[in-house]
Image (tube, rainbow, N blue to C red):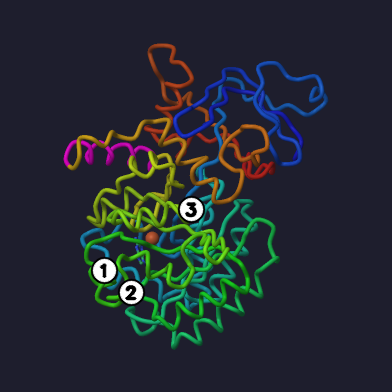
Amino acid sequence: MKDFVLKGHVCYSKSKSELITRENAYVICVGGKSKGVFSELPRQYAELPIVDYGDSLIVPGMVDLHIHAPQYAFRGMCMDLELMDWLNRYTFPEEEKYADLEYAEKAYSIFVNALKAGATTRAVIFATRHRPATELLMDMMERSGLISYVGKVNMDREATEALEEESAEMSAYTTFGWINAVKGKFHRTKPILTPRFIPCCTDELMEELKQIQMTYGIPVQSHLSESPGEINFVHFLRPNNAFYGDAYNDYDLFGKNDDINTDVKTVMAHCVWSTPEEVELMHKNGVFIAHCPASNMNLSSGIAPIRKYLDMDMNVGLGSDVAGGHSDSIFRAMTDAIQVSKMYWRHVDQSVKPITFPEAFYMATMGGGEFFGKVGSFEEGFEFDAVVLDDTTLAHPQELNVTERLERAVYLELDRNGIRAKYAAGEQIMI
Ligand code: GUN
Ligand code: FE
């Protein structure tokens, strides 16, 4: 069903500061794309089937710009260390288990079911370095109806022996095989090149990945300037780079580069400690920032200066970063983003104003959605991703307006038990 009309209280971003709420409105989907939101049903759409969701809220699907599928199993545990120790002590040993397809099947089905049950319609996902388990995850994601980029991780140093790939050549060879097997195989599930981060990738591997990117033209995801220990280590490993992001840029894996006429769609998670030069290059290259506030708190990484990035009109979305983040809820990530920005304002720099609710909603929908194209709004031409929220469980003694109800639905995490229906690119994926 790709041509239909939904009726309800429709909420969506028009820009980063403009949150639109329309009571008892019609939002129209034709060919999987929005035709816009209307108070009266336009005559040319009168014949389309209408689903009337009554007093429910209709919002765009949430976009998770950064999540690790294999870490879902240990979310909410192991929160006592900073990034580098946390990786060595907990994360790498867990990821080793995905060499076993039986384990991967069990764990990934829990992950995919959870994502499907929440408000997320699109996600940019790290798998592990194992090709068979990554393909299994892609199969499962495809069947879920969710839309995603999934990356087989590349890592050939500084992990456990079992998790490191044998050599840069082997890592590249496996990656070629994987991309050839999955490229064009799926409708909704696409490969994304995934160097884990600079500490885990030798120069030889980065050179190989540059060649693979040029061959296939696929997008790139990685981590950037997340934690002080990590950043010091990158400076030690790559002393000739003036800043961390420059190491990705050396291999043209850092957004667009007008000098050589390339445009590599890139998302970097965190950017908590980016220097002014790094920010300038991300801005110039159109690199997407996946802001992962819960992870940044759990791993004591810091507070990313998101207000600055938004004011510079950079590409910013939200990520759950499970299992650095303990919850896959992007509603929760919105609240966290607002809260940490208030602490930044109070404790770090009082000239940097906190993030507003409309801005957080924008990042969760349109901001991250742009990584997928025209996604994350109900403005005409956007792909039709929608979530229908029933907030009748959230009793209130007064009548609230739709804007108040939306904010409350997010803060009170109505994506846990209040989802009535969900659509991705015009397909209903949940009743
Ligand atoms: N940097 C490299 N790998 C990881 C990871 O798995 N999680 C987080 N948060 N940061 C990373
Ligand atoms: Fe991460």
Nearest the viewer among 149 and 206 is 206
Query: Is the CB–ligand 1 distance for label 2 below 8 Å?
Result: yes
Residue 189's image quarter? Answer: bottom right
For image coordinates 45% across by 71% down, the residue present is 195
- Dot 2 lies on which element? helix
Residue receiving disc 2: 199
Instruction: Give the amino acid at mark 3.
Output: Gly
Query: Ligand 1 falls in which quarter?
Result: bottom left
Per the image, is 412 magenta?
no
Q: x%, y% of residue 83?
A: 27, 64
Residue 1 shows up from this direction:
no
Dot 1: few (<14), some (14–19), or many (≥20) neighbours within 10 Å?
some
- Dot 3 lies on which element? loop
* Predominant secondary structure, magenta span: helix
* Viewer-nearest of discs 3 and 1: 3
Find out whether the residues at labels 2 and 1 contact each other: C-beta distance under 8 Å.
yes
* Viewer-nearest of discs 2 and 3: 3
* Viewer-nearest of discs 2 and 1: 2
Dot 2: few (<14), some (14–19), or many (≥20) neighbours within 10 Å?
many
**Image quadrant where one finds the C terminus:** top right
For image coordinates 42% across by 68% down, the residue present is 248
Instruction: Give the amino acid at mark 1.
Output: Met
Residue receiving disc 3: 286
Q: Which residues are magenta?
A: 332-347
Find out whether the residues at labels 3 and 1 contact each other: C-beta distance under 8 Å.
no
Instruction: Give the amino acid at mark 2.
Output: Pro
- Check the image and report above or below for 215 versus 281: below
The residue sitting at the left extreme is 347
